[in-house]
Image (cartoon, helix red, strand yellow):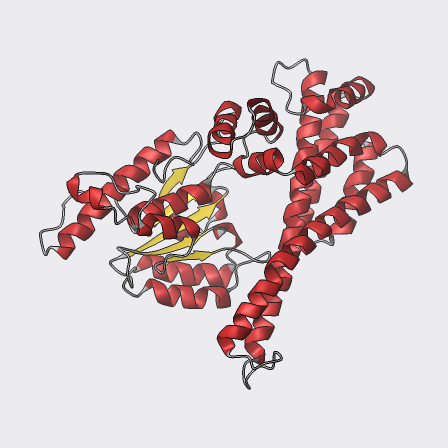
Amino acid sequence: MTVWDDLVGQEKVSAVLDAAARDADALVTAAAADEPLPQASKMTHAWLFTGPPGAGRNQAARAFAAALQCVSPDRALGGAPGCGFCDGCHTALLGTHADVTTVAAVGSEILVKDMRDTVRKSFTSPANGRWQIILVEDAERLNEKSANAVLKAVEEPAPRTVWLLCAPSIEDVLPTIRSRCRHLNLLTPSVDAVADMLVRRDGIEPEVAVAAARATQGHVDRARRLATDPAARERRAAVLKLPLRLDEVGACLRAAQELVDAAAEDAKQLAEEMDGKETEELKTALGAAQGGRLPRGTAGVMKDLEDMQKRRRTRTQRDSLDMALGDLTGFYRDVLALQLGSRVAIANGDAEDALDRLARGSSPESTLRRIEAIAACREALDRNVAPLLAVEAMTMALRAG
């Protein structure tokens, strides 16, 4: 097993990254031995990983980070970096390596204050690892100020620093940044590839794995969640019943409220799991006295944590809503396929009766308008429109479509 094994359906990307990791290892080894550096190298200081949701761009970046930090003794015998088992690989994959810094949006934007320390760190030499690696999971969420801070660091990086940026598409990143990065585009993996991964790695029954992979259309993380979490399957089943309920205004408003409430409950559960632990860990680090009293001058630090947690809850709620909207889009896509007599495989075979009913009772034009209404709702949520307002407008449009 290597660090590349979890990159489902990304053989070409894995090959490029493996070659770059080998050259990166040669550069560090030569420098440590005070030998001449290799003249030709596939390694560069900045990479941009793009691809549709679920393709695994963050996983690819993290696997590459692990390969760059690999300290397996097999490397000295001609083995490839990225063993997956050494301390460098293991801690990089877990996110605990001292020289792999991960930046992820906890709200709708990555603020410049969230990037300052990271940018400063990018100009330092690695503490223990072979490279100083900055992994930005949501590069599309960099605002103008934080993107400019990253640009300055990418323009003139330290010799042993590597930037790994991840975004849905190359257009989501500033032209000045992307022009300084080597671009790798990941493709949506096939249903068969995702199902095989679920069986092989997670021990899922083949029939369940295929159903989850088909329902999520190759989205690796959602397929795993759907295959392993009964609550996720229940939420999806409820979403797929929604189109048949939208027969009058009151039903539309109730359905919208239920979707928003379900997303809020997801956010609440995550907050309960994470917020309390983070708060106690920070209090301990700040030297809180018995009874929870904090030393003077630390209230601002606690307030920053509370603000971050609030932004994360908001994003979690919107991400949960977006997942439900993705399920709805897939449902109407299947309706459209039936209406047009397409031979495309139906993703939601478990809702075949509802699909047939809507396909017979509406036109392809109305189905397209409904898909557009869902897309408009997603765009509204990205613009920070109140979730309930955006979803109510969508359910009314689905009824009228």
User: Does 73 sit left or right of 332 as displayed?
Assistant: left
Q: Position of residue 10 (x, y in %)?
A: 41, 32
Quarter the C terminus occupies? top right
Q: Is residue 386 left or right of residue 136?
A: right
Looking at this view, is 223 or 172 the one in front? 223
Location of residue 233 (image quadrant): top right
Q: Position of residue 54 (x, y in %)?
A: 53, 37
> Could you tell me if residue 308 is visible in this image?
yes
Nearer to me, 192 or 13: 192
* Furthest-front residue in this view: 290
Query: Which residue is rendered at x = 34% and y = 59% of the image?
Result: 99
Q: Residue furthest left?
A: 35
298 in relation to 278, above or below: below
Residue 147 placement (x, y as % from top left)? 46, 58
Q: Tell me the quadrant of the picture where the N terminus can be found.
A: top left
Residue closer to the observer: 375 or 7: 7
